[in-house]
Every structure is written in structure tokens, then in C-alpha cells.
Image: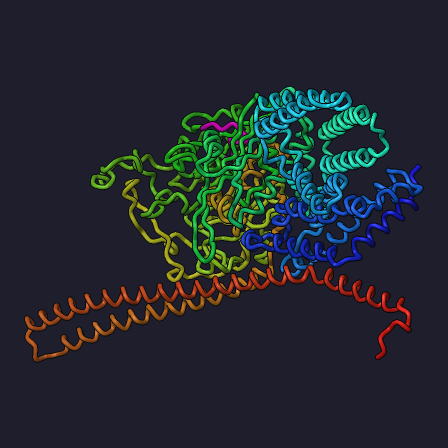
Amino acid sequence: MLRMHVVSAVFRRNVLSYFSGVLGYLFIVVFVVAAAFLAFSPQFFTKNAANLDQLTEWFPMLLLFIVPAITMNVWADERRQGTDELLFTMPATDVEILLGKYFAVLAVYTIALLFSAANVGVLMWIGQPDLGQVFATYFGYWIAGATLLAAGMVASSLTSSATVAFVLGVVICAVPVFIGHLSFGFIGVGLMVAGGLALLAGILRTVTLTSGDSRRGIWTIVLGVVLLLAGAGISLLPEALWQDVVASVGVPQQLQDFGLGLLPLTGILYFLSLTGFMLYLNLVLIARRHWSSSQQTSMGAQFAVRVVALVVALAGVNLLVSHASTTADLTGENLYSFSETTSRLLDDISSERPVTISAFISPEVPRDYVEVRTRLIGLLRQYGREAGSRVEVRIVDVEPFSEQAEEAEHYGISPRRVRSERDGRQITENVFMGAVVTSSYDEVVIPFIGPGTPVEYELTRSISTVSNAERATVGILTTDAQVLSGGGEWQIVTELKQQYHVKEVSADSPIPADEFDVLLAVLPSSLTAPQMENFVAHVQSGAPVLIFDDPFPLAMSRGSGVSLAPRQPKPSPGGAMGGMGGMFGGMNQQQGPPKASEGRATSLMQALDTAWNYDEIAWDAFNPHLEFGDIPPEYLFISPASGLSGAISTSSDITSGLQEVVAIYAGTIRPRAGSNLKFQPLLRTGTNSGLLAWDEFTQMSFDFASRSPAALPKSPDEILHVVDADAHVLAAHITGNDSRKLNVVYVADCDLISDWTFAQRQLNPELRFDNVTFVLNAVDVLAGDTRYLDLRKRRPEQRTLEEVEKRTASFKAERLAKEEEADKAAKQKLEDAEARFEKQRKEIEADETLDPRTREIMLANVSATERRRLKVDRANIDNEKKYQIDQIKAETEREIRETERRIMYMAVAIPPIPAVLLGIIVLLLRLYQERQNISRERLAPQ
């Protein structure tokens, strides 16, 4: 029976021994300083995330220093001083002594780790970290250190030299730390070299020495043969097996989950198993003193078998538990806790048709992509853990021009060129952030996951798609918008294909409702009268329809303006692909067939009991994005922050939970008086808004490519915006009754669904519009598939370095102000130069003594001279402005870097202070106690 008072006595003796000298405090101070330096390295500010990811990445290396430093004297010092014999003759068992010493080194390590927790205070000073994630991270540090402490004690038991114990401790601890970086080939060669040396030593011992030594030699030969065979067998194993199985058991790999804010049962059991194995090995080594010389060989063989059996048992337990998905998510927003939809979906996956997720991710990404990369990796690990063998997860680090990059591009995952700012310079980086989900049924490729992408939704939807043999179908109506044709399919089609089958539907003949589940119609006002008749008949049948129409479809415009607006004639046959005739002979080309009701879609509006002015748009003065203050009010930012609580409907499944939607030059709709249909507004402008007629916001142009008239938007200064104090409806869900079957979502803006909105979601982390979510929700609700609605609404909170951002923002504001002053000064100089020329011109024209010919010559000379001078002046002014702006940028970057350095120095200087103060206090107390114990007669006279 374990006697705790004995364990406690050994524990107190070793803890007091460690803190009795200066060296123990020195090691702790070095550890704390190193941890702070690694946690707040320059990369920490580059990533702009309030967490300890940088420290987690380097922490296993840090353990290689602190663990041997704590454990090197545990057994070695006892041997050196000869107190080990005294210790083992005490009335205590080997287990009690071992546990007392282990708890002592664990207490010392825990104290060192608590001192380093000052990093959390620094983190809270400069940001708002997720304290749940921080706790899980520090728990991971603690349990990883506790495991390696047991390994360090093994090293200390092998020698009487503290220095040798430190070196051996580093070597033994390095095995679980670096095992993920090795390969079967490397280990196989190492085992064969060790086996060869053991075989040679055994042969020499057997041939040359006594019978007792010969028996040992035979065992050495057996060991050498076993090592040779094991090395040869391991060398033949495929490297993929190493990556999938062995590499995952390294300490850095196990720490990753803790750093994300998770407490995985598999990770905890891994560390506990390794700790138990090392403690047992330690027990065997200190118990050798009980073996007589004649028992050395037999007892050694017996305990070797026991150790192997323990390894097999622990590996079996870990393998068994690895199929369990027990994981505690300590993050404040439960970032890695699956929704009921995801959990239910994973449970339904058949083990006979497993799913494989291959994620191709760049190891280094710009700061705006750090958060989504971290969450993507964390969720991928959760999928593999929760589903077990039914979902295989591959996370592939992709460097440019590598074999992994070729594999990614084979699946259609290519790098995205992402612009970011580094050291004051705009740089472009190639970023891989995609995945391919496959099963025996199907394959879905997610080309890129950007900052605005709901990660769990994308992965869960893709898994669901490939896990089922059947998919629902979305029909795309053929219109002048050319959603499926033209210059390539729209990105909304690519998005829909990840969940639905997509097929093109023509309105040239009656539309078969049984061939698809939802019909998507973009710009149906461009249909001809016969086509409109077929389309309206389909709408009136009660089939689900999603309509996007637009008085001014800006996203479909070319450089010469908009030519596909409802009030404009249909483009001539051939359109943009009509060749050079569009430029030289286009004026005489025959126009396309007329639109139904001249583009007013009258019959469709009547079927919906809805009013829509085909040449009228809405504007709204609300703009929550101050960085885009020059955007015209025709860009509509739909949000409850506009002052209208119902700007985004909270009562509809389509829009509930959305935060902001952007529409551009959008029209408005309203129910007709006396309508008995249900008209549910989904999106509305604020009350500080109004309407503009066609002639008020457009100016005429001509599109040579489509051979048709075009329109360009006027500048905001040319438009008179009159507030009408109404909240104009931009989108609505219209449903019928028993007598009239209707199920239509009508959106009076096509730009809302354009490729531009998809690009913003993937590439612009600051603009997190919900346009894509709105469209996909609408399709799902109409299709009757509401599984993914809640998933799309999950939006993690960004936890950044707010204090650093605040200071950086002030520096950048000063930079912009100075750049604006430099720009104004440059413009003023140009105006002065032009005014000088104008003054001379007027003087010459006002000189009545000059005849017309002389005046003309003088004006030409002055004009040529001033033109040359103006050209030189303009070049000099531009160069001077560029130089000033470059100087301003350089000064701003120096101030930002200096701020980051100040914070880093403070972060490194603050954590060791408590340890230093404690060491000074303990030293003063020891000096005081020593002085108190000295006899007064022995003190020197004052």
C-alpha cells in the first residue's frame, strides 16, 4: 500500500534541495525569458492573433532545455554524493521514492510554468485572448512537460554526472519531440547500424571471454540480430504509413489540439501513457540493485519482455481510444464543437463507403488568413477524430512548385494571388487553402477557403454531397445574363454544384417542373414574349423559383457601360462574340427579338401581385465602411445598423442571423393593393434613402461589343438625392394560398449574386458580406433542405492585437493625412504652372500692337515652350511627391516597428520579474536565518 507521508517526505526534500541554490532560479528565469521571447517574436505581430501559437510551435524545443535542467540531479546527484544508498535503506519502497522524486520535479516545473503565465497578462494587455483557449494551451504545456520529466529522470538514473545526465536527458526527450520529422528509412538504418555493432560486440565477447560473459555475449548477439531484422523490416515500410501513423505520435503533433483550445482524450491518454512507460522504466533501472550478479541476464531479459508487453498494451489502449471522439472544446465560441447537423451527418456515413478529405494548405499565410487557416486545421482534425475510420483526413503542407502543389492543381486547387502589406510594401503571395472531398459515390472540390467562408459548412456540405448517391437539382434559366454560358459560368453555379446537380433550362418550350427542384432565373426581364409566357406558367404552377432581376445590372457591364438593363433593347445576335463587325458594321445590325412587355416583365409582376419599376433604383446614405467613404449611395449596405431593425428580416429562415448584405444599383418591389398573397420582405433599405429614375442616374453610351446602346452611371455630384423616408424593399419571399400556388423569392438586384461578391468573401477579410449566404439559404429553403442554414451563420469572433492595431491605425491615419497634404501641394504646383502659361497666353492675346500672324506665332512658341516646361515640371513634381510619400511610408513603418519592439521588450522583461524577486527574497531569508543561528560571541564586534 502506498504511504503518502513517505512520498511527501521525499517530495519536500527534493523541492527544497532544488530551490536551495541559485542555479535552480537561474534555469527558471532563462526558461521564462525564452518562453516570452518565442511567444512575442516578430512573427507574432505579423499574424496579429491574440494567442500563443508561436510559443506552442517552439515549446517542445523549449522543453528540451528545461526538463533536463530540472531532472539532471534527481538521481545523478544522489549517486555522486553517495546518498543513494542511504535513501534506499530508509523504510520506503522503490515506488514511494520514485513518486516522491517525480512529484518534486513536477512541482518545480509547474512553478516555472506559472511564472511564464505572465505571458497571458501581456496578451490581455495588447488584445482580447480567448481565455478558454489559453487554459487549454497551458494545460497542454503542463502535461507535455510532465511526460518528458519522467523521461529526464530515466536519463539521470543512468549516470552519476549531472552534466552527462543533462545531455542524456536531451537525447532521450528528443525522441518523442523529433519522431514526427524522421522517416522509416532513417530509423531503419539507425537500427541496422545499432544491430551490427551489437552483433560484433556479442561475437567478440563470446569468443574471447569467460562462460558468464559468453552467455551475455549470446544475448548481445540475439539483440543484434533482432535489431538488424527490425531495421531491415522498417526500412521496407512505405513512408505514407509513417506519416499517417507514427508521425502523429510526436509531442509537437499532440500539442496542436491543445493550442487550438481543445482537450482531446486521445492527447491526454498519449501523454499519460508515455509518462507511465517512462516511470516504469525508471523503476526497473533503480531496482537493478536488488539483482544478484547471477540474475543480471535472466532478470534483464524478464524485464525487457515486461517493458515490451507494457508498450504493446499502452499502444493498444491508445489505438482503441483513438476511435472515440471525446474532446472538450474550451474556446469561448465553441469553434471546434460540431453542430447537430454535422454530428448527425458523420454518424450516418457508412463504414463501407468512407470519405477522404485532402486539404492543401500553405504553411505560411498573410495575417488576414491566419485565423481561417487555424480554424480549418482544427476542424479537419475534429472531423477525423469524431468520425474515426469513416472519414480519413489528410492535411498537406503545400509549398510553391512542389510535388504537393502539383497534386493540388491536379484536383483543380490552384494558389490564389493574395495582396498583403508587409514592412510598408504591398506584396502578392500565392496561397493554397483548398480541399477535395471524395468517396466512392462522388467528388467535391473546394478550390479556396477565404476569410469570409463558413468553414464547417463548406466541409460538412461537401461530406454530405459525396456520402449520398442522390443530389437535388437546381435548374438555371437561360437568359441574356448567360449564367451558364458566355465568358464562363458564374461562381454561384460553381458553388451550387458542390451541393446540387445543375442543369440549364430553356423557356423556349414549356418548362418541365419534375426535372429539377428549384429554378434559378437571373434577369428574366430579358425573355421574349413566348419565353415569358412559359416562365410565368411555371411560376404559377407553384414550383419553387428564385428570381434575380435588376434595373441596372452593373456587374454585367463592360467598359462602355451597361447594355443589358430591362429598358434597353436585347443585344444583337452574336453579341460580344460577333467579331469586328460589331465595331464597324454594328450600326446596321439587326437588333435581337423584342423583350416581353418591353422589359417590364408585366405578366410576371401580375402573377406575383407585385409592383416593380424596371427603370428605377434605390439609394441609401447609410455607409458603415468609413474606409470607403467615396462610394456612391447607390451602393446599398443592408444592415440593422442602418437604424431600421427590420432591414434584414429575422423571421425568415433565409435571412435570420445575417448581419450585412450589399446591393448595387438595386430596384425595389412592393405588393399590389388588395393582394391576397403573402409578401414577406427579406431585405430593406434604411429610412435615409430614396429612389432615382433612369434619366436621373444614367448617361448614354454605346457598347460596340454587344452592338447596342449602353448606359453609364453618373457621378454622385451630378445626382440630386432626395430622401423620401421610406424603407424600400429589395427582396421578398412571395407565397400563395389554396387558390393560387406560389413559392417565389424575388430579389431586385442581380449584382447581389455576381462574381464580385464571391471574390470579396474569399479575398477581402475586412468586407464580410452575407450575400453568398443569403443566396444559398434562399435556394435551400425553396428546395426544402434546411440542414445547413445554421452552419452558414456561424461566424467566429476575430481576436486580434487591439492595442497594436490602435497604435498602428493612428500612425497610418497620420500617414494618410501627410500623403494627402503632399498630393495637394503637388496639385497646387501643377495649377501654378498651368496658370503661368494661361497668363502669358492672355497677355499675348491682349497685346493689340501684334498683327494676327505674329500673335499666332508667339502663341505657338509660348505654347510649345510652356508645354515642355510643364512636362518637366510635372515629372519633377511627381517625383518629389513620390519621394515624400515614400519617406512618409518609411517613417510610418519605423514607428510601427518601434511600437512592436517596445511591446516585445516589455513582454520579455515582465515575466521573469516574479521569479527574480522570489529568488532574492529566498536568498535574503536564508542569509537572515543563517545569521540568526550564529552565536552572538562569534559575531564580529561592530
Residue 32 sits above or below residue 677 on the image: below
Q: Is residue 596 visible?
A: no
**Residue span colored magenta:** 495-504
Toward which corner of the image does residue 187 lie, by quadrant? Answer: top right
Toward which corner of the image does residue 302 lie, by quadrant? Answer: top right
Toward which corner of the image does residue 557 lie, by quadrant? Answer: top left
Count of numbered labels shown in the rendering: 0
Is 39 magenta? The answer is no
Q: Is residue 679 visible?
A: yes
Apparent side of residue 868 relative to residue 143 in the rendered image (left or right): left
Residue 410 sits above or below residue 619 on the image: above
In what quadrant of the picture does the N terminus appear? top right
Nearest the eye: 127 or 792: 127
In what quadrant of the picture does the C terminus appear? bottom right
Q: Position of residue 832 (x, y in %)?
A: 27, 73
Measuring 79% from the left and 35% from the top, which residue is drawn there? 285
Q: Position of residue 458 (x, y in %)?
A: 57, 36
Nearest the eye: 595 or 205: 205
Colour scheme of the rendered structure: rainbow
Apparent side of residue 110 relative to residue 726 in the rendered image (left or right): right
Residue 876 sits above or below residue 107 on the image: below
Q: Position of residue 411 (x, y in %)?
A: 48, 30
Residue 589 sits above or below residue 217 on the image: below
Is 499 magenta? The answer is yes
